Amino acid sequence: MFGSVFSWVFYTTIIDKFRSKDMVILSRDITMFGTIFLFPFALLEARDMRVDIVSQSDLVVAIVILMYLAILGSALGFLLWNKAIDLAGSSTTTNGLYFVPPIAIFGDSIILGNLPNLYVLVSAVLVFVGVYLSEKA
């Protein structure tokens, strides 16, 4: 978990240093190099898997799923993150990550109809107050 956090902080710091560059090209290059360096490890993992994509319909489904993850999950996500750093700066953009749990609470209430308990509401208020104070400083 700490490795993930440190790598994300490192990535955000590097992107913040390249704010004068075109974010689309920067996102493309980062994604391309990430794919190149990840590909050999993906082949090692695939060797151990027992997945057999024989039928053409299964192959089409697999390709559609990979394209969805590549375009929306990775490329668009990183492009928007890089653009947010370019527009607002790294500290403000990173503070925006703290809004994910309160938004999930709101979505859970609206979509699933679950009512949050007192601890959840207090936690959401503390998140908003913490982000406000960190942005004010």
Image (spheres, grey):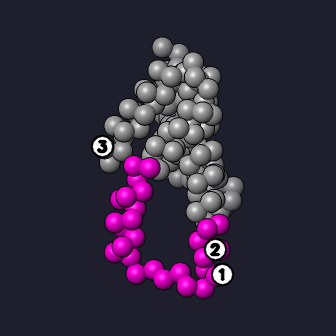
Would you say 46 lies left or right of 128 here?
A: left
Helix, strand or loop at mark 3 = helix
Per the image, the residue denoted by label 3 is 2
Residue nearer the viewer, 116 or 135: 135
Residue 134 location (% of width, % of height):
48, 21
Let me know if residue 90 appears in the view: yes
> For the point 60% across and 38% down, which residue is it?
79
Helix, strand or loop at mark 1 = helix
Per the image, the residue denoted by label 2 is 61
Label 2 with label 1: CB-CB less than 8 Å: yes
| Amino acid type assigned to the residue bearing label 2 in the image | Val
Residue 39 location (% of width, % of height):
42, 57
Would you say 135 lies left or right of 64 here?
A: left
- Mark 3–mark 2 Cα distance, whole angstroms, equals 34 Å
Q: Which residues are magenta?
A: 36-64
> How many tags in the picture?
3
Residue nearer the viewer, 10 or 130: 10
Per the image, the residue denoted by label 1 is 57
Q: Nearer the viewer, mark 3 or mark 1?
A: 1
| Amino acid type assigned to the residue bearing label 3 in the image | Phe
Q: Mark 3 vs mark 1: which is more N-terminal? A: 3
Crowding at mark 1 (Cα within 10 Å: few <14, some 14-19, many 20+): few
To which quarter of the image does residue 87 belong?
top right
- Mark 2–mark 1 Cα distance, whole angstroms, equals 6 Å
Would you say 40 lies left or right of 99 here?
A: left
Residue 129 location (% of width, % of height):
52, 28
